[in-house]
Image (cartoon, rainbow, N blue to C red):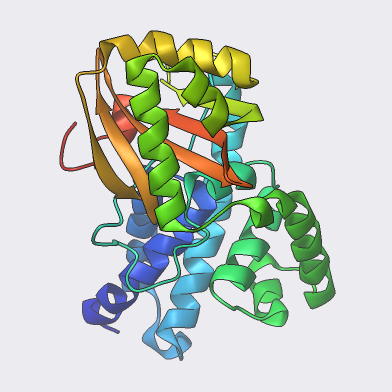
Amino acid sequence: MTDREFVEHRPMLLGLAYRMLGSVHDAEDVLQDAYLRWTGADRGDVAQPRRYLTRVVARLAIDALRARQARREEYVGTWLPEPVSTEASPFGAVDASDLSIAVLHLMERLTPPQRAVYVLHTAFGVPYPEIGVILERSADDCRQLHHRAAAALEGRARFSTDPAEIARLLDGFLAAARGGDVARLERLLHEDVVVWSDGGGRARAARNPILGRIKAVRFFVNVSRHVRDDRPARLNGEPAKIVDSRMRYTVSISVVAGRIADVFLVANPEKLAGIDGHG
């Protein structure tokens, strides 16, 4: 058993833990724990390193997710996933379609076992009997958990994954907001748009989601007066923006039927430390 084998599988394992937790910081903690278990494991008990490490990381991630959910009421305002730059993906050459902030945000409504089954089966193709070993459940139970998770996430099927469309709408939206162009904003935003902002009590942000086009337009015309600059980024596999204003924050969107359905603003500095090397 060697460090080389762990390093070889590390991008995949990080992707698994991040999908489970929506936090690079928490995912790195899980991998550190997994590495300690890896170095202490009996070589004779590990026939397939990838399978062994997947099992260890999944179990640790479930424990970490349960612990975080128990503390969630202590978090100030809305909790959003931590943005991660995928210009050079830390997760390796993998499908990034389920890494978007919008999809990870939807996953927060799942129970830890549902999320584990959904991620393992959908993103990594792990069969139900093997997931059952990880979760100590039957294969049929895991199949049902996946069914319930997929039903809870059915909204993701509506999201556009066309990078060109997302980039065009995002550029137009931020330009209209900075210019105070209310009419253009109203055309770009879905009638039932929701604005989610995460300051974590460390940066100014709306404590509650902003619901509907009228309130969203008013909010963005107001906050965009202070924007000094915005620059494009590839975050979570999709076009996004990093905005410099009175504070620094990222902007990601979901797109449904050609209009912006969700806007996700992450301003918590602890969640931005890994973006472009800035803290």
Q: Is residue 109 above or below residue 204?
A: below
Q: Nearer the viewer, residue 161 or 123?
A: 161
Q: Is residue 167 above or below residue 219?
A: below
Examine the rendering and report whether any part of residue 267 can be seen.
Answer: no
In this rendering, position of residue 209 left or right of residue 56? right
Q: Is residue 137 above or below residue 222?
A: below
* Quadrant in the picture for the C terminus: top left
Q: Position of residue 83 (x, y in %)?
A: 37, 42
Q: Residue at x 15, y 41 (%)?
A: 277
Q: Position of residue 46 (x, y in %)?
A: 44, 86
Q: Quadrant of residue 225 in the image?
A: top left
Q: Residue at x 50, y 55 (%)?
A: 19
Q: Residue at x 51, y 19 (%)?
A: 183
Q: Nearer the viewer, residue 94 or 29?
A: 94
Q: Is residue 160 above or below residue 37?
A: above
In this rendering, position of residue 79 left or right of residue 13? right
Q: Position of residue 87 (x, y in %)?
A: 25, 57
Q: Quadrant of residue 71 in the image?
A: top right
In this rendering, position of residue 93 left or right of residue 190? left
* Quadrant in the picture for the N terminus: bottom left
Examine the rendering and report whether any part of residue 252 can be seen.
Answer: yes
